[in-house]
Image (cartoon, rainbow, N blue to C red):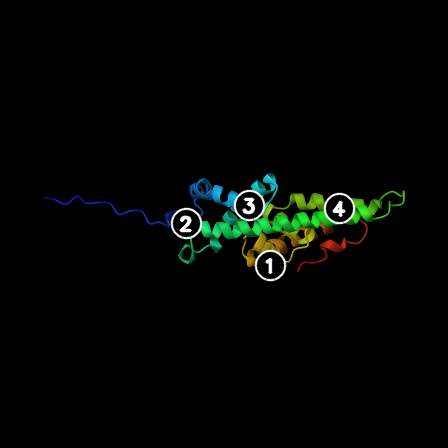
Amino acid sequence: MTAVRQEPDPPADDLAVRFRAGDEAALREAYDRYGRAVLHLATSMLANGSDAEDATQATFVAAWLGRDTYDPAKGSLIGWLLGIGRRKVIDRIRASARETRVVGTVRQLPAPAPTGPDPDRVVDRLVIADELARLPDDQRQMLELAFYDDLTHQQIATVTGVPLGTVKSHIRRGMASLKRRWEVDGAAPGPRPAGLSGTR
């Protein structure tokens, strides 16, 4: 009796390997397979369903952007995704708490004097926003996290899942582009805003 030859089963970590290699089909498959688990984690920690969905989406975006930092030999893809998901949820909780504190502080402030805004400052802010919008998405995201959210390079790497060296490179290139445009365009007659004077 001739034995029937069976094909070996595909390796259990095939999805993880393809995901790390940048296979977009693996990204979709990972979301279909593990998205519900990440959403469950986010929902269990966040009261707002919309925030939980945002945290889930942010988890997969960060995982995809930082996929080269994932080592399938050191752990499962679902474990890695849930780790990123926890950080995204914590970031959302901290952001909500910060927003609540800001709103509370603003409500306690006395009514501002009825004077108009400083035109130069308004122009500077508009120019900066316009210049940021012209940058590549990666550079713009890193600069916005650095200057608007006041995050350090290490914090940005943790939040986005992007390697620290890549974060620094994006910020350095983005700053160089802004500096060139500022000097060439003569964006504003006054000094540059303090928020764009450097990075950490």
Q: Which residue is mark 4?
A: 103
Secondary structure beneath disc 4? helix
Does any portion of residue 187 appear in the rendered image? Answer: no
**161 or 125, nearer to the observer:** 161
The reply, left or right, for residue 174 in relation to residue 109 is left
Q: Against 74, is 25 above or below?
A: above
Of all residues, the one furthest to the left in this rendering is 1
- Mark 2 or mark 3, whichever is nearer to me: 3
| Mark toward the start of the polypeptide (3 vs 4) | 3
Report the amino acid beneath label 3.
Answer: Ser
Report the amino acid beneath label 2.
Answer: Ala
Q: Which residue is mark 3?
A: 44
Mark carried by residue 106: none
Residue 179 on image: x %, y %: 70, 53
Q: Which residue is mark 1?
A: 154
CA gap between label 1 and label 3 equals 27 Å
